[in-house]
Image (spheres, grey):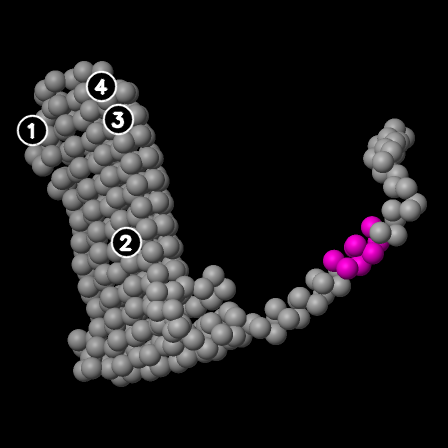
Amino acid sequence: MRRSHDLRNHRLAICIPRGRVVAVQVLICCVLALSLWMVPARLAAASQKRVQKRFRVGSGAMLALKTHAGSVSITGGPSDEISIDVNVRGRDKDVKDFEVTAEQTGDQIDVSGLLQTEDTWIWYSPDLRVSYEVKVPRKCRLSVHTSQGYITVHNVKGVLKGGTSEGDISISNCDGDINLETFGGSLRADSCAGTIGMRTSCGGINFSAITGDVDVSTSAGDVRILDVGGKVRAWTAGGDMVVRMRGSNEGVHVESSGGDISVILPPSVAGNIDAEAVAGEVKCSLPGRLVGEIRENELEAKINGGGDPIYAHTVGGNIRFLAAD
């Protein structure tokens, strides 16, 4: 094979012996023909179905949803009805084998999504796409579990628990005891109240405008908890952390194995500060009076007379205590 470079056009020209041109053309034609044959075959194998369920419930409404696959979006509203709208897409066999059932016992609705296969240990297909759109009364208890997909909950008041094996979790305008986890995804909470416990094995955490206690952790990701009124407990194995408190100090416990920590507190905050940056330094610019021991990488002191503990610890980063605007 001979190559020539045209300096005027700045293009690389490849010269192929005439005898081989025909073979190359035949190969290209075969590839194109095979592709054109496979596309309609694959499209023909694709399928879709929709399942809709509706139930009237009372003041003690509860939804328990468990699915082998699917993203779940739940929204609370003024209605006294629970509605479930499920869309299933994928290969024809997978769509047929995916069964959605819903049963009512009093005010409790149990929803199940199962992939029925001959091999009972196989419960997932990479070509299967399932989504749940659910509407519930504003006051409703929720238990949500999915193996593949995100979970989103908005405007619900009541106990909320559940998790996903792979997907983000986002809640907003929720009020109650909340306990959620994902093994692979980010966590988000906005304008929520109550006691919130959320965990992820791999993903960032972003909370804002929270009234109540917060307990969160991630094995790999940054943590941002802003405008929180209540106790805060947060941990990350690999990421930076920013915590901004409002109101009086009710207790802070934050740790990072490999990142910086910034704790932003009201100027008049009172508490017992215990901070250590093993491989970094600790800085405090709070305007209150500090009484205690202050070193380059440690701070153990009372501020404004002392109070609930303010604990911060990092192995591979710095710690800063700042005053809120």
Give the x, y percent position of residue 146. 33, 63
Kindly indicate the quadrant of the structure image that contains residue 80. bottom left
How crowded pointer 1 is (Cα within 10 Å; few <14, some 14-19, many 20+) is rated as some
> Mark 4 falls on what kind of element?
loop
The CA span between labels 4 and 3 is 11 Å
Q: Nearer the viewer, residue 197 or 249?
A: 197
Q: Quadrant of the C terminus?
A: top left
Q: Amino acid at mark 3?
A: Val
- The residue identified by callout 2 is 181
Residue 281 visible somewhere in the drawing: yes
Report the disc number at residue 315: 3
Single out the mark in the foreground, 3 or 1. Answer: 3
Q: Amino acid at mark 4?
A: Asn
The CA span between labels 3 and 1 is 28 Å
Query: Nearer the N terminus, badge 1 or badge 4?
Result: 4
How crowded pointer 2 is (Cα within 10 Å; few <14, some 14-19, many 20+) is rated as many
The CA span between labels 1 and 4 is 22 Å
Q: Amino acid at mark 1?
A: Gly
The CA span between labels 1 and 2 is 38 Å
> Mark 2 falls on what kind of element?
strand
- The stretch in magenta equals 24-31
Single out the mark in the foreground, 2 or 4. Answer: 2
Q: Nearer the viewer, residue 61 or 5?
A: 5
Residue found 25% across the figure and 51% down from its top: 198
- The residue identified by callout 1 is 305
Q: Is residue 30 magenta?
A: yes
Residue found 24% across the figure and 46% down from its top: 216
> Mark 3 falls on what kind of element?
loop
The CA span between labels 3 and 2 is 25 Å
Report the disc number at residue 297: 4
The CA span between labels 2 and 4 is 34 Å
Residue found 20% across the figure and 82% down from its top: 105
